[in-house]
Image: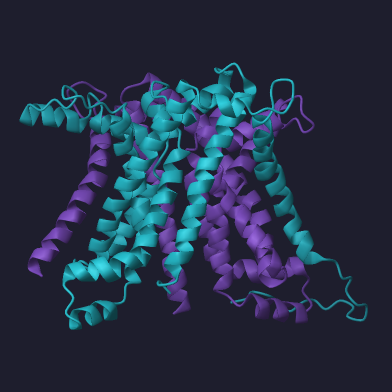
Amino acid sequence: MKKNRLGHWIAILLGSLYFVVPLIATFEFSLRKLRGVYSFEAYRVVLADPQFQGSFTYSVVLAVITIIFGLMIIVPTAYFVELRLRSLKPVVEFITLLPLVVPAIVLVFGYVRLYNSSSILPLTASTRGTDFLLACGYVTLALPYMYRSIETGLRSIDVRTLTEAAESLGAGPLTTLRRVILPNIRSAVLSGAFLTFAIVIGEFTFASLLNRPAFGPYLQLVGANRAYEPAALAIVAFAVTWACMGIIQVISRNRTAAIK
Amino acid sequence: MASLTPAHSTSPASPPLRLPWAWIGVAPFLLFAVLFLILPTAFLVVGAFRDADGHFTFGNLRELFSPTILSAYWISIKISAASALLGAIAGAFMAYSAASGGLPRWIKPTLATFSGVASNFAGVPLAFAFLATLGRQGLVTVFLNASFGLNIYAYGFNLLSFWGLTLTYLYFQMPLMILIFTPAIEGLRREWREAATILGASTWQYWRYIAGPVLMPTFLGASLLLFANAFGAIATAYALTGSSLNIVTILLYAQIRGDVLHNQNLGYAIALGMVLITALSNLAYIWLRVRAERWLK
């Protein structure tokens, strides 16, 4: 038994080493911009770069739009499918799994050809249109995760009873959704939202091929032209991902605590 | 709980207008799916069977088997398969060790949290991290050289190669496997092991005839999911190697950018080929998951 446990320790240690060493290396590398001393110079340069600020803000705004837009189409769908349109469930689930089957680069290829300036719906002809297309692309990327999160939330509450209670008090479907269902699945919605944020913030393929000044293409550009700044940016990106996942953990822990 | 204030009762006398609310609620989603998922994909699929003048042809699909394109597919498949298989094996071991290896209790939730972060830490920043680690000036490269006189680049290692990219992909593949596989391991009932031991089974026999067959569908299914995950990835590879590594996503990226193949419809055919490959591996994954759930209820 003692020998067995040693093997498990080794597995965990080797794995942790593989996870942690690149982080340490990246951090160490990011501090080396000034010759001979460790400094945060690379971070200072990056954070002061107007292009960084611009692209990061752009991506944050786009992530928020993606989340709102995604929730607006996914929450009602998941709710009505759960409540009334049970027969539609396999179709909706199949659709939500499609983004895992069709790679992002294929999808954006389709967008570029289908919505170019000479098509019926020339979304890429204007900046705003392209932004909208990009947000739609991000909604599809987030679709599998967001839908699953919300569906789990809906299943953990008694949708039918809550709806009937709301209706017998005179609430219409919109009021029921907004004031009864949404508050009850708040933690699921937030989990989905932060996961979406983590996915969207550094996304490269869509933004690059639609030529929008997002954070992902900016990262790529810095990577191709600078030495130490990319490492600093990698640490920043890791911190953002970590923050999103940490918030999700806290939210879901509160949810379990609330149920108990 | 429900935060509904009692409705300000309006006139309950008139019966409410019965609108098909459920369909109104689902319609935007369906419209969205048609416009931004199904139509774009269908457009490419149809385009793959057309020539430049719009006539039906199998010519584009035939051209997929030209050496450049075939080798791009092949390298992609090799990297995806290698990173999926290695990630699945290593992830399964770690999940098992953390879940039932008799280690301190804090290890499992810590590993789960970290896996959640690392499986989402992909794309361009991941490439930067590995350049800082195993690039020519990377910490580990320099450390090995200075401490042991081991110059890994002299021994033929290159981050911008098949093994380099595989090693990098493992950084999100392994955590994903840990996340998928941990529930399966927790589904192994202790009674099964006890029953086997009482009947005189050795540890090896337990794994060979009981735990192995129960876990195998989950393991294979997860491997396929990891495969599709790596197959469609581009950002990490592009940031790491520029366009020097000829994998199919990078080829397609170049084609979208500037029609490097001088045949628009050939680009569609490449996209179709990619969708077919990821669709097949996803179908197999779903089939295996249905099998796996038979035991893990």
Where the C terminus of chain B falls, by quadrant?
bottom left
Q: Nearer the viewer, residue B234 or B139?
A: B234
As displayed, is residue B291 above or below residue A40? below
Q: Nearer the viewer, residue B289 or B40?
A: B289
For the point 23% across and 44% down, the residue is A18
B161 versus B126 height, above or below: above
Task: Report which quarter residue A12 is drawn in.
Answer: bottom left
- For residue A107, above or below residue B289: above
Decide if residue A240 is on the left or right side of residue B189. right
Where residue B49 sits in the image (x, y, percent)?
Answer: 67, 31
Q: Is residue B116 visible?
A: no
Residue located farthest toward the left when viewing the structure as drawn: B148
Q: Nearer the viewer, residue B13 or B94?
A: B94
Q: Is residue A188 left or right of residue B77?
A: right
Could you tell me if residue A190 is visible in this image? yes
Quarter that holds the N terminus of chain B:
bottom right
Q: Residue A106 appears in which quarter of the rendering?
A: top right
Tell me if residue B8 comes above or below residue A85 in the rendering: below
Chain B shown in which color?
cyan
Q: How is colour applied across the structure in the image?
A: by chain
- Tally of marks: 0
Q: Position of residue A83 (x, y in %)?
A: 69, 72
Which residue sits at x=57%, y=18%? B258
Residue located 56% across and 24% down the image: B63
Residue A208 is situated, as x and y percent measured from the top left of the image, at 54, 28
Q: Residue at x 46, y 21 (%)?
A: B68
Quadrant of the rendered structure where residue A121 is?
Answer: top right
Left or right for A226, reference A130: left
Q: Position of residue A167 (x, y in %)?
A: 76, 77
Chain A on-screen colour: purple
